[in-house]
Each structure stands twice: as structure tokens, then as C-alpha cells.
Amino acid sequence: MPGYTPGMISPAEADALIGQQFTCLPIESLPLVQCTGAVLREHVYAERDQPPFDRVAMDGIALDSSGLRGGKTTLRIQAMQAAGEPPLKLETAHYAIEIMTGAVLPTGCDTVVPIEQIDVHDGIATLKEPARVTAGQNIHRRGSDTTQGALLLSSGMLLGAPEISVAASAGMARIRVSAQPTILVVSTGNELIEPGDPIEAHQVRRSNAYGIVSGLRRRGFQRLADDHLPDDLDVLRRRLRVHLDTHDVLILSGGVSMGQLDLVPRVLAELGVRPIFHKIAQRPGKPMWFGIGPTGTAVFALPGNPVSTLVCLARYVIPGVYAAMGETVRSVEKIAIAAPIEVKVPMTSFIPVRVQGDEWGRLWAHPCPTNGSGDFSSLTGTDGFVELPPGPNTYAKGFVTRLCRW
């Protein structure tokens, strides 16, 4: 197992190390209504053919098309059949059955004429001109979507509305998913003051924790808590020891750089957290730290500058947690930049962008550079950031690269 990696590593190497070290989260069985946003941890197979019968696709009349041969345009209404009722049997080709969308095709019928193409008066249905009737029209045939036993959902899929609907159609009242991780957001620093509290000129608002929690909630994570710790060794040791014992993931903001009061790496080491890496060759967010606690807790110590914090959260923490939940398919979104971007530093650069479509419907990433990693106000209205390779280089308009959304 790889241990501490000296010096700076690349973003790709950071991805790999997080994936190798992050303990897979446990599995739990939950009612289907509680599974939106969870990661599926079992395969789901079709309970029956889908549709499970020849299903009527339009309101109208069901009939035997042979009854309209020779230019005949009228049929007597035999009965009405609604969705959810057993199929009726057509008595003769000279009759028709009024039918509703979603109903079983009556026995003896081979076609459905939409209600817009008929007139019904005194129990007689008359086809309007120029109605055309062919066998099989407006019928969704049994098994044409999927057949019984077919694989519908694969383990590792993130469950959204379509996947939940499919699981319900397979008769799954409960499904096995990854347990939601317990996540604690910890901000450190004596200078941080809660919103709404009195503040002095030399102090700053505690905003990073709110941004992190918001980003996590937006992705569906629910078991969240946060704590604010001062730059005090004894307090850090005591509180972080408790947090390591009671949470799956710790996300710390601040205290990981090179200053005398950047105490987080030292305290984590004292508490038995095994460092995996410290510093990534990127801007912003170079001081990011990642380690694993004695009981498997994943610890992400993010730089304290707000832009760095949110970039590292979206680029590493959220994908890492999803991977630990068993998600196997997470496509990398690519996009073209809408204007040239100069990268001066020999490290990966993350540039905030606003995503907009042009008149042809193509999406472009419009650069919204900040005034440094502390300029979080410049992030308002942005959709995420693009990842540009190390410089020095100027990337032209149209350069296609990775997009990470907030």
C-alpha cells in the first residue's frame, strides 16, 4: 500500500491515491423512496416482460382490422375497457371496443384507431376521412422494451429519478445501496466569526464551512455536521480524536499550509492518521492534504482560501466519496473554452467558468478568473471550473478540457 508521497503530485496521482486508500462504505437495505441520490450495490433484473402485455398506446377504439375491408367505415361499439381491467374478447370483426391508453389489448383485436380519427354516435363508431387503419398500429407490444430477467440496473449506478422508476417497475420495494457516509466539516482558525455575530476589523466571517456543506447537500449527502476549532493544539487534539472515532469522512478547511499555526497535519499525525499525500501541483489548492485515520476515516484537509476550498471539494472530495460508495461509472465532462487562457505556472490550473450555449446550441466555458484564491466573490454566477494542463502555455479558444461543476 502506498504511504506518504513526498513533494507535489499531479491531480491524476491524487485521484488514484484517494481511490486506493478510501475504505469502501458499508451496504444497507432501504425503502425505495429513500434511495434517491444513493449508489446502487446490487443488480436489478426485470420482474416481467416490459410491457407485460400488448399495451394500448392511444385512447380510441380497438378492433380487428379485417372488419374494415371493402371500404367499410363503421363498427358497433361492443363495450369499453379501461386500463387495469382484464382483456375483453371481441365478439366479431364487425364490432369495436372503446379503449383507454395503457389498457390491455382486447383478445381478437389487432389495431387501435385514435379517438381523434373517429366519431361515436348511438353506439356506432365511424372513421373520419382520411383515417388509415393498419394491423399493429398504436400498440406497444409485450416485451418490446425488455424481457423478463433482463438486467435493468447495474451495481454502482447513481440512483436518480429514472433509475428509481425502473427499480419500482421491477417490483423492488427495497434495494441495497451504499450507506450514506457521516461527514464532518471542520474549519480552523481564531480569526473566524460566525455570520450574525459581532465582528472586529481584524476578523473574517466563517464562510468556507457553509460553502462545503452546501456543496455536499446539493449532491444529496445528508448525514452532515460541522465544527469550528481554534488554533490550539490541545483543543485540536481533543476534538479531532472524537471526530475521527465517530465519522466516515472529515473535511477540514484551513491549517494545512506552512505557517507556525498551521497545526492540522501535526495533530492528525499524533492521532494516528496516516498521511497519503500533502501538496498537489495545482493552482489554486496546492497545500491540499489527504490521509486515513486509524479506523479508516478519510481525512481531507483543504486549504483555507475560499476558492481553493471549493475547488478541492468539487475536484477530489465529492468524487472520492462517490467512489467509496461504490459508484463505478462517473464520466468526465468535457467542454471547450470560449476565450484564450494563459497558464504561466508549471502546474495544473483550475479556472472558474460560466457555461453558456451559443446560437447553435453548443456549450462553451467562459473564463471568470478570480483575483486570487481568496476572491470567492468572483465565483458567484459561475458553474464550476475547467482544468488546464501545466504551463507555460496559452490555450486557444476551442481547447477542450475537463469541466468540474460546483
Image (spheres, rainbow, N blue to C red):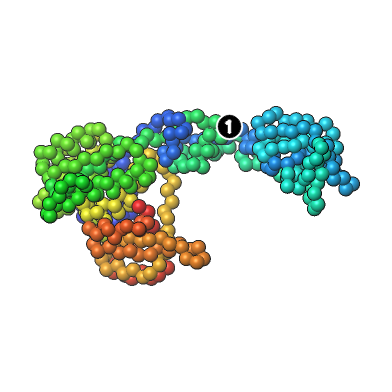
> Which of the two residues, 337 or 17, is positioned nearer the viewer here?
337
For image coordinates 36% across by 36% down, the residue present is: 180
Whether residue 302 appears in this view of the structure is no
How many badges with numbers are in the image? 1
Q: Is residue 76 left or right of residue 3?
A: right
For image coordinates 66% across by 37% down, the residue present is: 102
Q: Position of residue 222 (x, y in %)?
A: 34, 38
Judged from this view, the residue extending furthest toward the right is: 70
Residue receiving disc 1? 47
Q: Secondary structure at mark 1?
A: loop
Q: Look at the picture and state if 8 lies above or below 178.
A: below
**Mark 1 neighbour density, 10 Å: few (under 14) some (14–19) many (20 or more):** some
For image coordinates 85% across by 45% down, the residue present is: 73
Q: Look at the picture and state if 290 lies above or below 388.
A: above
Residue 405, picture quadrant = bottom left
Q: Position of residue 271 (x, y in %)?
A: 17, 37
Q: Position of residue 278 (x, y in %)?
A: 22, 50
> Which of the two residues, 134 or 131, is positioned nearer the viewer here?
131
Amino acid at circle 1: Glu
Q: Look at the picture and state if 2 lies above or below 83.
A: below
> Which of the two residues, 39 or 347, is positioned nearer the viewer here?
39
For image coordinates 43% across by 30% down, the residue present is: 30
Q: Quadrant of the N terminus?
A: top left
Whether residue 94 appears in this view of the structure is yes
